Amino acid sequence: MTLFLQDKASTHIRMKRKICYMPTFCGTGVGLSLLICILFVLGNQVKCDLYEGKDVKGNALTVVEAADDDLEGAVKIEEEESFVAIDDSVEEFEPTEEWQEVKKGQKIPPGLHVQMDFQTGKKQAKRIEKMQKPKVEKWDAGKKIGIINTEKPRYTRDELKAVLKDFKYQDVTPEEQERKRKVKENFRSYEELKRALKDLKMAVKTEGEIVRELTNKLNESSKDSDQIKTILIDLEYYLHQIDNAQLFCDLGGMTFMLKLMNSTSEEIRGSVCHTLGAAMQSNAKVQVSAMESGILHNLIRGLAMDPSKTVQKKMLFALSTLLRQFPFAQKKFLEEGGLTALASVFKEADNMNIQIKIVTLLTDLMNEGDTYA
């Protein structure tokens, strides 16, 4: 049996001491106790030598099994020549920025990158790359203070202006030039389109300008029924916009509409009510203008007296847009007998659609009354 006990006496040299004995009392308690005592004494001696700074050539114990013909009970301590882990004859490793192989027994200075190939057992090392800080200088311009990197090129504002002034874009590929040529052949430029529209006496108009023109045409008495109907249909399209409807009121459009509500043409009366409903819907300013113009009174009277069921249906639409979210108009509606007019229309209705509209309007007005209360 062989037992090795190793302890480093220095960072570079490892040694061993071998103890050979013949266990006469092998297998007995006395022999085992003797072996333990010897190991304990030698271990303490080595520790003392290390503490006192003595040069210990070896402090490794080797216990070997003795042969039968050796002397009985004899214990023999043998010292072997020490072996050196680091070869002093090999030069110290000189690191560089590249990976280099470390020779066997070569000392590696501290502060290096070291890597080892576990298949071959070879080591490589190199110097640690240090981050170079950019060279900077302080910059003070009165209220503004900063740091400038002197390693990067700097340009003044005048230099940049001069470069941009002389800059010419010449990196156009032949394919790009061909595409531009085809575009010019197939399409006209904006200036050419403007000249063409000018020759046709056409101009782009805003919605406000269109509403103004339609209102002026509506005021002309020379228009026949078909022209007035066309104007009302166009106005209905534009008066859905809140701004256009308010502009229409500012131009006195409600006065014109009030006159047309008394027209003898059933189609004109129906178109007027439909246009009024489009203008007053969710537009408080137009609702106020309609009340000031007397539109509510004409709607109540038309519901009670107009013979056309189609016109009554459109009047009911205009009335609902005027009364919704407008408590003052609702109060005037009750004072002028609006409920009586609705009851009359409800009884004389020949279809259920008008009746449903009346019930829906009254229900909404009651819910609004509860909310305001």
Image: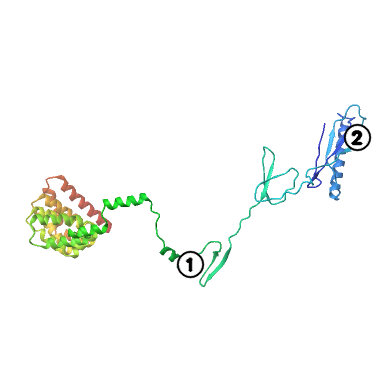
Q: Does residue 302 show up?
A: no
* Residue 55 on image: x %, y %: 86, 48
**Residue at point 37%, 50% (across, down):** 174
Q: Amino acid at mark 2?
A: Val
Q: 258 or 251: nearer the eye?
A: 251
Secondary structure found at label 1: loop
Secondary structure found at label 2: strand
Question: Whole-Å distance between the Cαs marked 2 and 1?
Answer: 93 Å
Q: What residue occupies the far left of the structure in this picture?
A: 264
Binning the other alpha carbons within 10 Å of mark 1 as few (below 14), some (14 to 19) or many (20 upward) gives few
Q: 72 or 86: nearer the eye?
A: 86
Give left or right: position of 303 versus 98: left
* Residue 46 on image: x %, y %: 85, 44
Q: Amino acid at mark 1?
A: Thr
| Tally of numbered discs | 2
Which numbered disc, 2 or 1, marks the residue that appears first in the sequence? 2
Which part of the image, by quadrant, shows the N terminus? top right
> Label 1: which residue?
156
**Residue at point 57%, 66% (across, down):** 137
Give left or right: position of 261 versus 171: left
Q: Which mark is residue 75?
A: 2
Q: Nearer the viewer, mark 2 or mark 1?
A: 1
